[in-house]
């Protein structure tokens, strides 16, 4: 029997960490995709880091993003990137942040099998028992008309995703 | 077993239109979520709007947080004739989520939260107030400039609390 | 799709429960409430979402598992107040909710998301989309909160910092989202 909001896959990073969380062979039977991420990386020196988002393993320079954010916890700002090889403004908790703390990220991808370029949003927060964090509202696009069949979340700058980081992929059906 | 999260209606535009309406929205859910993946047929970035229950009176207002790509800011509109939906362009489709919590509550005005995501224009978080206690039974999306392009999609989901 | 349905509406067959499920709902009655609580939250889901409209006599505290130790909480805010955008932080239990006062005409809308709420290896991070507008005032933003405990979340309490009341008609719906 069909249901609207369904778990497709989940990943928990084990001991030793992982370079990425990778959702592959995504079925085409849904309308929208939702990715929930609870991430921490192993890069020291900052309470926040980044985890890149890449679709269909495509590293072409066809990713754009525009965001409003804070990364210091004291002022709001905005930035944009064009022609990137992935989406880069997807924050995670860094190794210098409060221990046992992970980010809370929502990626919403409507019409992931549609014939248009793939627009999606990222709302993400890191946390820390101090002022400095990242709160990001990001509008993103992968300028490809292909159906999305893979979503890869990779630690930036060769950092690894820490043990206990998790990722969950859900499908939403519009009928 | 009852389903909590259900699709109510969806459309993919087969022809360009200046507005699209979800009508006869049942009052049996608690919240509505509208997902908008639309772009304009032509022209530069502009705004789009929503009206509820065909109300085009000065019964709306909003506060917005935005990022242009180079600066962050905030703005406000009072006694407006519609809900400010944010930016829309003809280059790339939106990935907007519009949340109507307690949309059928007949004791309260309606507060709407919008995440507007036009990657080639200004990104928004918007809160809007519709000063009416009526249950929301229709939602109309409008663009005063150009039209919503063929292939644009509008989807309405209902969430039912226990 | 039923040929008799209005344009775009579906007479769809019954849907299965799915992985997004209602757990509990609290609606504040006449006279208001001094607090709202979700207790005995089952551990059978992976994530929690609270969807709410609310007004209160003051800012609100949010507590997990009756933990009222302020040093166990931290919150961060990214908001627009209509004239400027800003960011701030707060050490303590102050809930990162943009609150409409009891005399306001419009309620605050709030969507709280807690991921891995029962994970014994993690502190709990809450992401919040929140705002209210009063036709000339208001605020909207993305906010967050940290609860420094690895305990599974079994209870969530919301109460005004001072004053007495969460307003009548405020409504809080708790949902669970499965992850396995």
Image: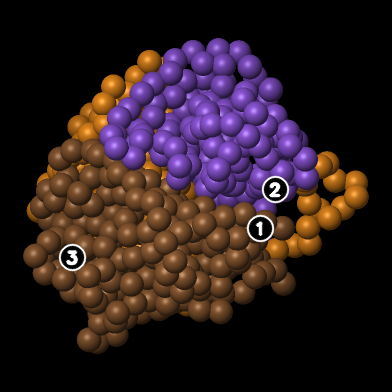
Chain colours: A brown, B purple, C orange
Disc 1 packing (10 Å; few <14; some 14–19; many ≥20): few
Residue that protrudes farthest toward the right in the picture: C3
In whole angstroms, how far apart are the C-alphas of marks 2 and 3?
41 Å
Query: Which disc number belongs to residue A94?
Result: 3
Residue that protrudes farthest toward the bottom in the picture: A15
Q: Chain of mark 2?
A: B
Left or right, A162 with respect to B103, comes to: left
- Discs 1 and 3 carry the same chain letter: yes
Q: Comparing marks 2 and 3, which lies closer to the viewer?
A: 2
Q: Quadrant of the N terminus of chain A?
A: bottom right
Left or right, B24 with respect to A110, comes to: right
Mark 3: secondary structure:
loop
Q: Residue at x 57, y 46 (%)?
A: B93
In whole angstroms, how far apart are the C-alphas of marks 1 and 2?
8 Å
Q: Which residue is mark 1?
A: A115
Q: Is residue B138 visible?
A: no
Q: Which residue is mark 2?
A: B151
């Amino acid at each position: 029997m069909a249901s609207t909001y369904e778990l497709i896959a989940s990943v928990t990073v084990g001991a030793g960490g992982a370079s990425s969380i990778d959702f592959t062979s995504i079925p085409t039977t849904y309308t929208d995709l939702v990715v929930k991420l609870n991430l921490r990386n192993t890069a020291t020196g900052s309470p926040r880091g980044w985890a890149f988002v890449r679709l269909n393993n495509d590293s072409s320079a066809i990713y754009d993003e525009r965001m409003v954010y804070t990364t210091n916890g004291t002022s709001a700002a905005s930035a944009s990137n064009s022609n990137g090889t992935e989406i880069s403004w997807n924050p995670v908790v860094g190794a210098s942040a409060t221990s046992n703390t992970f980010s809370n990220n929502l990626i919403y991808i409507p019409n992931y099998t549609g014939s248009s370029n793939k627009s999606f949003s990222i709302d993400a927060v890191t946390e820390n028992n101090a002022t400095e964090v990242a709160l990001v509202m990001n509008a993103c696009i992968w300028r490809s008309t292909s159906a999305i069949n893979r979503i890869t979340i990779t630690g930036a700058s060769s950092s690894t995703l820490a043990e206990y980081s998790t990722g969950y992929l859900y499908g939403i059906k519009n009928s | 077993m009852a389903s909590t999260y259900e699709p109510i209606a969806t459309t993919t535009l087969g022809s360009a239109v200046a507005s699209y309406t979800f009508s006869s929205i049942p009052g049996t859910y608690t919240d509505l979520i509208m997902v908008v993946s639309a772009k304009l047929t032509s022209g530069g970035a502009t705004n789009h709007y929503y009206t509820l229950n065909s109300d085009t009176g000065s019964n709306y207002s909003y506060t917005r947080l935005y990022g242009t790509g180079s600066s962050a800011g905030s703005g406000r509109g009072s006694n407006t004739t519609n809900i400010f939906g944010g930016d829309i362009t003809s280059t790339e489709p939106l990935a907007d989520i519009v949340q109507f919590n307690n949309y059928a509550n007949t004791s309260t005005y309606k507060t709407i939260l919008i995440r507007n995501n036009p990657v080639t224009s200004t990104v928004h978080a918007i809160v809007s107030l519709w000063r009416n206690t009526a249950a929301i039974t229709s939602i109309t999306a409008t663009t005063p400039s150009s039209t919503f392009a063929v292939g644009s999609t509008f989807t309405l989901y209902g969430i039912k609390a226990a | 799709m039923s040929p008799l349905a209005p344009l775009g509406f579906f007479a769809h067959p019954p849907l299965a429960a799915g992985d997004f499920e209602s757990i509990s709902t609290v609606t504040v009655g006449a006279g208001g409430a001094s607090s709202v609580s979700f207790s005995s939250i089952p551990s059978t889901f992976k994530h929690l979402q609270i969807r709410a409209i609310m007004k209160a006599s003051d800012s609100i505290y949010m507590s997990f598992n009756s933990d009222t130790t302020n040093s166990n909480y931290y919150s961060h805010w990214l908001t627009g107040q209509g004239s400027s955008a800003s960011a701030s932080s707060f050490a303590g239990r102050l809930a990162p909710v943009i609150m409409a006062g009891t005399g306001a005409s419009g309620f605050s809308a709030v969507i709280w998301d807690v991921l891995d709420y029962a994970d014994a290896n993690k502190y709990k991070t809450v992401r919040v989309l929140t705002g209210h507008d009063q036709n000339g005032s208001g605020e909207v933003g993305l906010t967050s909160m940290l609860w420094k405990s690895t305990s599974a979340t079994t209870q969530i309490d919301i109460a005004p910092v001072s004053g007495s009341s969460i307003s009548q008609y405020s409504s809080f719906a708790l949902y669970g989202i499965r992850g396995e």
